Image (cartoon, coloured by chain):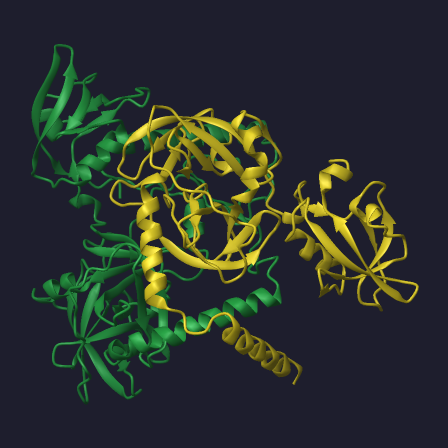
Amino acid sequence: MGSIQCLAIVGCLAAAFSTLHASEPDLAALEAKVKSVAQQNLPATVALLSEDTNSSGSGVLVSADGLILTAAHVVQGAKEMFVVFPDGEQITGKVLGANYSKDIAMVKATGKGPFPFVKLGESKPLQAGDWLVALGHSTGFDATRTPPVRFGRVISEGPGNFLTTDCTLIGGDSGGPLFDLDGKLVGIHSSIGKDRENNNHAGIDGFKDDWDRMLDGKSWGALTLNPFANPEMPVLGIAMGMRPEQKGVMVDGVVDGSPAAMAGLKVGDMIVALDGSAINDGGELLQMLAKREAGDSVKLDVLRDDITFSTTAKLMRRNEIFESP
Amino acid sequence: MKHPLAKLLLICALPNLAAAQDEIPLLRPEERAVVDAQSEALYATLKTKLATAAQSTVRVWSGKKRLAYGTVIGDGRQVLTKWSEVADAASSLVVDGPNREAHDAKIIGVYEEEDLAILEINGEALKPIAWSNEKPALGAFLAAPQPDGRPAAFGVVSVLERNLRETDLAFLGIGSDLQHKGPGVRVSEVQPNTGAAVAGLKEGDIVLMVKERPISGLMELKSALTGTKPGETVPLRVRTNGGEKTISVTLSKRPELPKIYNPRLEQMERMGGKISRIRDSFTQVLQSDMRPSPDQIGGPVVDLEGRVIGITVARADRTRSFIMPSAAVVKMLANTPNDPSIAKVREPEKPVMARAPKSDAPQVPKAPSPQRMREHLLEMERLMEFMREEMRSLEPER
């Protein structure tokens, strides 16, 4: 009986959302945009090959003088890479910097150009249901075809700067571009999970914070596939206590100088909501935090001595307040 | 949980496949609700485009097992379906269409290369499909119906029409020196009895142009040859010891070459659902990101105007399905099919085993032991040999 009720509730929610957000999509208009995004951005979607590491990924040019954005794991171990355009033209590129924690990197094409390039968009405003177009040299450069076009939408935000879409990816797509319907670059392909809806991309806004350091040739961070182990994972700086009979997360410790300390949290407080969404347990708090980024401010509803009050915490990176292992 | 996507041809030092975990770790119920509602609205709109084609879409059964979809052709008593899915049916074939009425069916003809079969059905005739010669553009929306009119799959044109059969590709017959940074391709080897040998190309020569196109490197040479056909004679601009000259080379067919087994890629291909057994070497197909299941292959595909632009012929992997365009289907049907009693299912491509697949590789790479390092080196040498072989062939790779 219980499961049937659950299904009914989900059905109602879906119906409510469909009237709000998804009523009668204008498919012809949508199709026209997808065609134009694909065609206009194909020439700047390159394959990146390294003979030293035998890595074969993708990248995208973002300036006429040859700056290429890609994924950190594509350039890992390489100093120089072949840059191959969809028509087969091949030049060399110099690997600049990378932030492995975000799986983002830069390569500079050698030669004068001017090269075809794409415009940068924004990834932070993206949310579930936003339509997207993915390009990339799936399974490596293939002279018999152009980089395959894939269409989909945001399925889930996070962790941190990453987002998950149902634009299906496969080996070779890594480092390739993800576009919004205006044709602006919003992400770089990073990894996949078993589910076909589990395709992960590094958001373009993550590049912006690290732009100059990468351009300067700096590489840092650690490639991790577990969002909760990522050193850049945003945290409050609390120890979570157990209080199974009560909904919320009990504060069992507060790190000095942490977001929690600055927000005035004390041992014994119960965090019951984050940005208006109820928090039932520690897992849910971690999940909600993983969708945010360091530097973001979150509103916490806190229960102390039977009184609920709100406070704001500005999140920090885990490795800013906890020692790295 | 997650897989870095760079395709690594050799040893990958990167985290590999962990235990299968299906869910998206950070998916919130609110997000699921938005996405599901969006799919529902999309499918409702698509239904109106699929209504006509659905009337000519059937399911092909063997007992209780659905093998494939089919497309009604001819006078309404023939069905085109996927040969490899119906060839070894355990029991006799039954077809049902939009009104769910069961028709006994038997295979009357086979097109082995296209992996398609013609069935003849008993009972009342169904509505034959109306083909369209419309060629959808890159990024155009495509949908495939279920017989009841609901969508079976939706996607876009990922790659325009092309030939996937490697032996149809033009072959020059040189190996390239990978140390040469360009421009051009420095010949490291000339294979005997090829166009390159006949034309007198020598080791150390640098190929600068194919036809009038300057060649930056190996990939561009492959691209330039993709536009040519076996038997065609093309002018090559070549720098030799004695200076530059233009020579004419008659291209041959690409010989069959071993395909390297890449366990990581193979595994990724299967992540996201079942795939068709025969999914390669089609001579005329569009590539789409639509995701019909293998037992939904063989039905019609429409564009946003509801025009039937082709039929599905394979679900190839996580990212790809292949669609045979209507014009190619009509042309094929003008040829006499093979007798089903002697027709064979063609062999799927068998890649060369380079490394045993690992089912449960560790998620985080560990420092390899000296023993493992030696094994890696041996593996690498073997793989390098395969790679050299591949490079030597120097023809458009599929």
Image-quadrant location for residue B296: bottom left
From the top left corner, tell me how far across and down residue A288 is, in percent.
68, 57
Q: Nearer the viewer, residue B380 or B375?
A: B380
Name the image quarter holding the C terminus of chain A: top right
Chain in yellow on the image = A
Residue at (41% x, 73% y) in the render:
A24
Is residue A197 placed above or below B130 in the rendered structure? above
From the top left corner, tell me how far across and down residue B318 is, in percent.
41, 56
Residue at (23% x, 37% y) in the render:
B223
Residue B207 in sight: yes
Q: Is residue A312 left or right of residue A292?
A: right
Is residue B323 placed above or below B180 in the rendered structure? below
Image-quadrant location for residue B140: bottom left
**Farthest-out residue, right:** A305
Chain in green on the image = B
Name the image quarter holding the N terminus of chain A: bottom right
Is residue B119 placed above or below B375 in the rendered structure? below
